Image (spheres, helix red, strand yellow):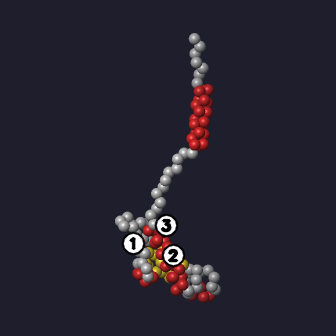
Amino acid sequence: MTARREEEGGAALVPETDEELLAQCRVDTFRSGGKGGQHQNVTESGVRLTHESTGIVVIARNERSQHRNRTLALARLRRRLRLLRTPDKERVPTGIPRGERRRRLDEKRRKGATKDLRKPPPPDE
């Protein structure tokens, strides 16, 4: 998601009515493609909504009707705006498990023993 979060007070409230939400968006219609034969070549039933303040873009082209696709796009946009308002969960770092700690120490001892074998023998007196 490439939308930016508004820092002060969270993102603006999601408008209740479709008209208010559409007033905040740029609406583009296009030929949706897919099944439909000759009908789909002449009907601009696909809808692309771009929310102006956040930059969120949603596309609906599932239905044959532009009206139905606009309704679907508004529902998707509402869902995305609500997700944008929810704060990210703070990450809780996990501890190193006991078994992993033990394996690391064993490996460290093995490496040390290997390096001890590389040393020259102690001088005899």
Report the Cα–Cα distance between label 1 and label 3: 17 Å
In the image, 117: left or right of 54?
right
* Label 1 crowd bin: few (<14), some (14–19), many (20+), radius 10 Å: some
Of the residues under marks 1 and 2, which one precedes in the sequence?
A: 1
User: What residue do we see at 54% from left, 84% from top?
Assistant: 68
For this orientation, the residue located farthest to the top is 125
* Label 2 crowd bin: few (<14), some (14–19), many (20+), radius 10 Å: some
Name the residue tied to disc 2: 76
Name the residue tied to disc 1: 12
Amino acid type of the residue tagged 1 in the rendering: Ala
* Label 3 crowd bin: few (<14), some (14–19), many (20+), radius 10 Å: few
Q: Are marks 1 and 3 in contact (CB under 8 Å)?
A: no
Position of residue 109 measured from the top left corner of the image (x, y, whole percent): 59, 33
Q: Give the quadrant of the C terminus.
A: top right
Of the residues under marks 3 and 2, which one precedes in the sequence?
A: 3
Badge 2 element: helix
Report the Cα–Cα distance between label 1 and label 2: 17 Å
Amino acid type of the residue tagged 2 in the rendering: Arg
User: What residue do we see at 44% from left, 82% from top?
Assistant: 17
Position of residue 30 measured from the top left corner of the image (x, y, whole percent): 52, 82
Amino acid type of the residue tagged 3 in the rendering: Met
Q: Which mark is residue 47?
A: none
Q: Is residue 7 visible?
A: yes
